[in-house]
Image (cartoon, rainbow, N blue to C red):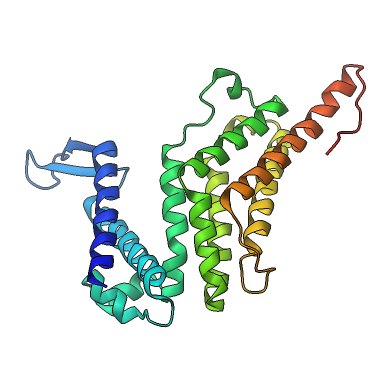
Amino acid sequence: MERVGEWACERVSERVSERVLEGASARLSKPGVGRPGDIVLTVGGMGLREMKRAETERRLAAISYDLVRARGWVDVTVDDIVEVAHVSRRTFSNYYACKEEAVAAVILHLAADGLDTWRAAGSADLQDLEDPDNLVALVRDLVRHQAKAGVLTRMAEVSTLARAHNQLAPYVREAQWRLWLMAGERLPKSSLQSNPFRRAELDAILGAVFGVVSASLARSLPEGTAEAAYPEGVRELVEHVLDRLGEGLGAPRAIRAGGTTSAAQP
């Protein structure tokens, strides 16, 4: 158990350290704040206290996830988790209501890291979100980036854990919902403020992706079909749906231009 816990702690510390090196900015303190010449360190807009809380939150989730995967649900208690993390039960309760919530949180932590490193539409043509093709391409780029970051794999792993533990299922669904909201906030919707129809189309595309992923992972949940959701299979389904949405959203332009459209073949 100690080796599992130590490995989890080291892994979280490495991730936090990487983010410190990438996003840290040091500035001189303002006059009247602290001592003259003091350096105040901020990381991604967070002070040291906030950064410490974020690190503790991630560490508790990572330890919970690794212990459950290594030992199973029955043989892991909150006492085991706090013992490995070297914190009190009260500290644990400040972040999570139970071990199930902590395990499901690893989905959001990995997804947040992926969203932080995603840069919307690297090519200049995708900046024109008035073009429906670019709306689909934007969401497709985000999905592929998250898949490369391992988010789909982590979601499938946690969903599979829920098959052996019914109490985890609602927390997995909550994590999926929050991930969808996080992704929506990350998309550059500000440029669509003047066009509510295009913005609605972007919301619909993202919602379709959420539906495909959630339905696929639901097959791994207790009341589902007990069919394992493989990340590559889920991604293939998402790509297919995005292709069809691209065809559908592009049809009105062809009609307005005097063109004709034919029924798309599956």
Residue 187 visible at all? no
Q: Position of residue 120 (x, y in %)?
A: 52, 31
Please determine whether, in this image, residue 211 is positioned above or below residue 202: below
Please determine whether, in this image, residue 100 is positioned above or below residue 174: below
30 relative to 199 in the view: left or right: left
x 83%, y 39%: residue: 266
Q: Quadrant of residue 124?
A: top right
Please determine whether, in this image, residue 101 is positioned above or below residue 118: below
Q: Quadrant of residue 219?
A: bottom right
Q: Quadrant of the N terminus?
A: bottom left
The number of discs equals 0
233 relative to 82 in the view: left or right: right
Q: Nearer the viewer, residue 23 or 75?
A: 75
Outermost residue on the left side: it is 36
19 relative to 233 in the view: left or right: left
Q: Nearer the viewer, residue 36 or 206?
A: 206
x 68%, y 51%: residue: 212
x 7%, y 45%: residue: 35
Q: Position of residue 34 (x, y in %)?
A: 11, 48
Q: Position of residue 262 (x, y in %)?
A: 91, 28
131 relative to 172 in the view: left or right: right
Q: Position of residue 265 (x, y in %)?
A: 86, 35
